[in-house]
Image (cartoon, grey):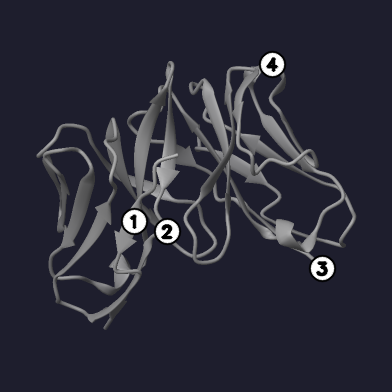
Amino acid sequence: TQLLEQSPQFLSIQEGENLTVYCNSSSVFSSLQWYRQEPGEGPVLLVTVVTGGEVKKLKRLTFQFGDARKDSSLHITAAQPGDTGLYLCAGAERFGSNYKLTFGKGTLLTVNP
Amino acid sequence: DTGVSQNPRHKITKRGQNVTFRCDPISEHNRLYWYRQTLGQGPEFLTYFQNEAQLEKSRLLSDRFSAERPKGSFSTLEIQRTEQGDSAMYLCASSFGGAYGYTFGSGTRLTVV
């Protein structure tokens, strides 16, 4: 199983600040996904990146997949309290006709008003 | 379709008792996954079904754990002779394909006392 390392593990910022979280692996993934999880709930898919160098934007969130498809970043502009949550990256490994997700430990983001 | 449904949301049980959780996936999805998540960790893969066939099981799934998906619809996860170390959030997810993201349920929080 390939390992995904996320950094930082914890991040506490003020409303309006920008932030970047990172997801790194030594191995190549077929795709990489970012999820956001609130306490007591399951993860919710934010985005999937597939192509090396790909950049996707979702309102104030910008996701980038590394050229070698081993790493990814999530940048949030002008963070809001509603962005508070656990951000998880997950790499998809292909097993036959299936893709299995391996998750990082997550970055716990707190945005203070 | 309202997404992936898991029941119960919370379960408190005494050590040594058996528990069973249910997952109803999105009806169009042919793949169903069980993950376990403990505090401060990302979800860890337990097992995967394609239709009614259980195609992969993690070594985390000891012989006290069993999962079924009769008729390729809902799935159940049973834990026999529960131990305190089984306390965790048990997440179910479904997908059609898998490379582009899973839809997770809200999870079942198990506490073994």
Residue B77: horizontal and vertical position, in percent?
72, 38
Q: Residue A5 got which mark? A: 1
Check if mark 3's residue and mark 4's residue have beta carbons within 8 Å.
no
Instruction: Give the letter of the chain under mark 3.
Output: B
The count of marks equals 4
Q: What is the CA distance from the residue labelled 3 to the residue labelled 4?
A: 34 Å
Report whether mark 3 lies on the same chain as mark 1: no
| Along the line of sight, the residue nearer the viewer: B43 or A76 | B43
Pointer 4: residues within 10 angstroms few (<14), some, or many (20+)?
few
Q: What is the CA distance from the residue labelled 1 to the residue labelled 2?
A: 7 Å
Q: Nearer the viewer, mark 3 or mark 2?
A: 2
Q: Amino acid at mark 2?
A: Lys
Instruction: Give the letter of the chain under mark 2.
Output: A
Residue at mark 4: B71
Q: Earlier in the sequence, mark 1 or mark 2?
A: 1
In the image, is B54 to the left or to the right of B31?
A: right
Q: Nearer the viewer, mark 3 or mark 1?
A: 1
SS of the residue under disc 3: loop
Q: Amino acid at mark 1?
A: Glu
Q: Is residue B69 above or below residue B59?
A: above
Q: Amino acid at mark 4?
A: Lys
Q: Is residue A69 above or below residue B30?
A: below
Check if mark 1's residue and mark 2's residue have beta carbons within 8 Å.
yes
Q: What is the CA distance from the residue labelled 2 to the residue labelled 4?
A: 34 Å
Instruction: Give the letter of the chain under mark 1.
Output: A
Residue at mark 3: B113
Instruction: Give the letter of the chain under mark 4.
Output: B
Check if mark 3's residue and mark 2's residue have beta carbons within 8 Å.
no
Quadrant housing residue B33: top right
Q: Quadrant of the N terminus of chain A?
A: top left
In the image, is A5 to the left or to the right of A58?
A: right
Q: Quadrant of the C terminus of chain A?
A: bottom left
